[in-house]
Amino acid sequence: MDLIKGYGRQQPLVEFEGFTPQESMELQQGGVLVGALEQIKGWARSNSLWPLTFGLACCGIEMMGTGASHYDLDRFGIFFRATPRQADVMIVAGTVTKKMGPLLKRLYEQMPEPKWVIAMGSCATAGGPYIRSYSVVKGVDQYVPVDVYIPGCPPSPPALIYGLNILQDKIRMEAKGKRVPRT
């Protein structure tokens, strides 16, 4: 049993669900109360993501398959929302055209803070096979800041789940006050 020292006596370490043993020790040792509250908020935010679906092409089908019963995103606390006012994550899945870019930015601006963006598929990340077209955006990051890039044409549902797990880790790290690079 791990022990922590506090006020001249040793106490058993309580592990909080969803935190690593190191994070549990930091929370239990006290430190700055505000830091602990921020970590708890980060943990709660990371385990209750509400993505705004922005399926534009074939990647949208894979995103819907990820939310269906076989992969079941609900078990991770991830529930798709149809309105930007209730969403905190935007999953851009598919080809973004120059006509759609300003609408994408408007929806992003309507989302409440804190908010994150996932670019799913080679079209959303870099233009995909349509990169030479005059009407295709060469990556959604030209309109909104992207936090996680998921490559593939189209990426499989496990790849999307992995990308969402990376985003969850990033949210927890940001709550600790650590700067996390875009992946």
Image (cartoon, grey):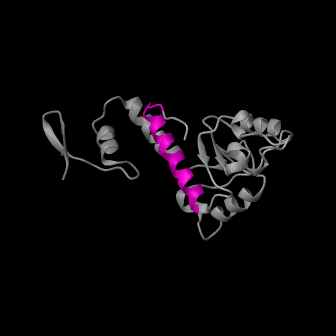
Q: Is residue 83 visible?
A: yes
Please give left or right for residue 88 compared with residue 170 in the image.
right
Please give left or right for residue 26 compared with residue 175 in the image.
left
Q: Is residue 166 magenta?
A: yes
Q: Hey, which residue is sitting farthest left in the picture? A: 8
Please give left or right for residue 174 compared with residue 71 in the image.
left
Prevailing secondary structure class for the magenta stretch in the rendered image: helix
Q: Is residue 86 visible?
A: no
Vertical position of residue 173 compared to residue 81: above or below: above
Vertical position of residue 172 compared to residue 47: above or below: above
Q: Looking at the rendering, which quadrant does residue 142 occupy?
A: top right
Q: Is residue 168 magenta?
A: yes
Q: What span is colored magenta in the figure?
A: 158-179
The residue that appears at 31% across and 30% down in the rendered structure is 31
The residue that appears at 35% across and 49% down in the rendered structure is 16
The residue that appears at 33% across and 39% down in the rendered structure is 27
Q: Position of residue 68 (x, y in %)?
A: 65, 67
